[in-house]
Image (cartoon, rainbow, N blue to C red):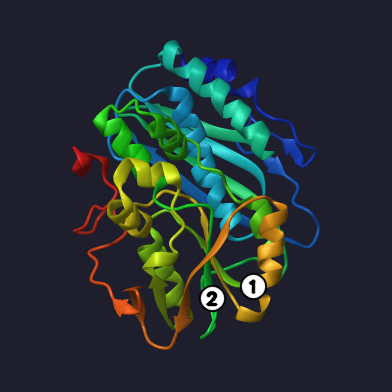
Amino acid sequence: MGEFELINTYFARSAARRDDVALGIGDDCALLVPPTGAQLAVSIDTLVEGVHFLPGSDPALIAERLLGAAVSDLAAMAAEPAWFTLALTLPTADINWLEPFAAALARRAAELNIALVGGDTTRGPLALSVQVHGWVKANEALTRSGAREGDLVLVSGTLGDSRGGLQVQLDSDLSAPSAYLRQRFFRPEPRIALARGLCRYASAAIDLSDGLVSDLGHIARQSGLAARINLEQLPLSAELEAYAGADKARQWALSGGEDFELCLTIAPERLDECQAVAAELQLPLTCVGQMQAGSGVSVFSDGQPWNSSAQGYDHFGEHFGDHIGERR
């Protein structure tokens, strides 16, 4: 199968349709029509076999993880998803891999209301890149640099589940909690509605891709502040605690990465309003700490400093906290 036949068979015909796509797949560029007065939000994400998912993983699950993780970056800035492009590096044009991948990608794109508008394919070791595009009204985007001293640190959902889902795969575990954790690894849920609802209250935001300590550190550094995390306040799922135990679950919540939940900072007086938005969406929103003067991120347990080796994932750093190769 040639490159153009591959694109036409598996992607061009199933691409979602949107009124703001003037010209989609099939030309040198897509022609897109952002809303008047909106700012364009753009981000790119790459998944590599052996780094972000285990060799032999279900291609349908890979598609869900790829798109969900990428759209989470739009949610972090309170942007509405609109379009994405896809670059595939494939060892072979294997229809047994392409068919479930393309079908799952189309389903997930429809759920997220984001249209595939172009891309590229090439031969090589399995790697997948998605560039997502969305839009946000001027002055409504959430950034990492707006936190203020005294702001509360909030996180959505539960933390550490994705790291637990990775361990489930490495252990080939089929116990009851493992299905939930595995789903949390492969199907991240971008918190778009929550971000849109909280953008009027939040001072800063980031999605948790590299772990709470690492990602909150980005907010702290870009806001010129320090952050304090209270260990006992970390939101943990019952499934993760049952699988890993409380101590390991907390460690994974701090540094496991790839939960793709939101981490936001807000003024204390806006907490009730933010909790009301989250409650309407039936989504947990938990205060886990506070911004303060200084630099760095510190973790406290029962009011005392807690020595933790928790770090985030850095592809080129000395600590590969979320590298699949390091889990074997």
Residue in view at x 46 percent, y 57 percent: 235
Q: Is residue 52 visible?
A: no
- For this rendering, which residue is in front, 161 or 136? 161
Left or right, 168 with respect to 94, comes to left
Could you tell me residue 211's position as x and y percent? Answer: 38, 57
Could you tell me residue 50's position as x and y percent? Answer: 27, 35
Amino acid type at image mark 2: Leu
Residue in view at x 36 percent, y 64 percent: 214
The image shows a total of numbered marks equal to 2
Picture quarter with the N terminus:
top left
Q: Secondary structure at mark 1?
A: helix
Residue in view at x 68 percent, y 56 percent: 279
Label 1 vs 2, first from the N-terminus: 2
112 over 322 or under it: above or below: above
Q: Which residue is mark 2?
A: 152
82 over 9 or under it: above or below: below
**Mark 2 surroundings within 10 Å by alpha-carbon count, few (fewer than 14), some (14 through 19), many (20 or more):** many
Q: Which residue is mark 1?
A: 271
59 over 309 or under it: above or below: above
Q: Work out how far the residue at label 1 is from the one at label 2, CA to CA, in angstroms.
A: 8 Å
Q: Which mark is residue 237?
A: none
Could you tell me residue 40's position as x and y percent? Answer: 66, 57
- For this rendering, which residue is in front, 232 or 316? 232
Amino acid type at image mark 1: Leu
Could you tell me residue 75's position as x and y percent? Answer: 60, 54
Left or right, 31 with respect to 75, comes to right
- Answer yes or no: do the residues labelled 1 and 2 have beta carbons within 8 Å? yes
Residue in view at x 22 percent, y 64 percent: 309
Query: Would you identify the image quadrant in which residue 319 lies?
Result: bottom left
Picture quarter with the C terminus:
top left
Q: Is residue 244 visible?
A: yes
Query: Would you identify the image quadrant in which residue 274 lies?
Result: bottom right
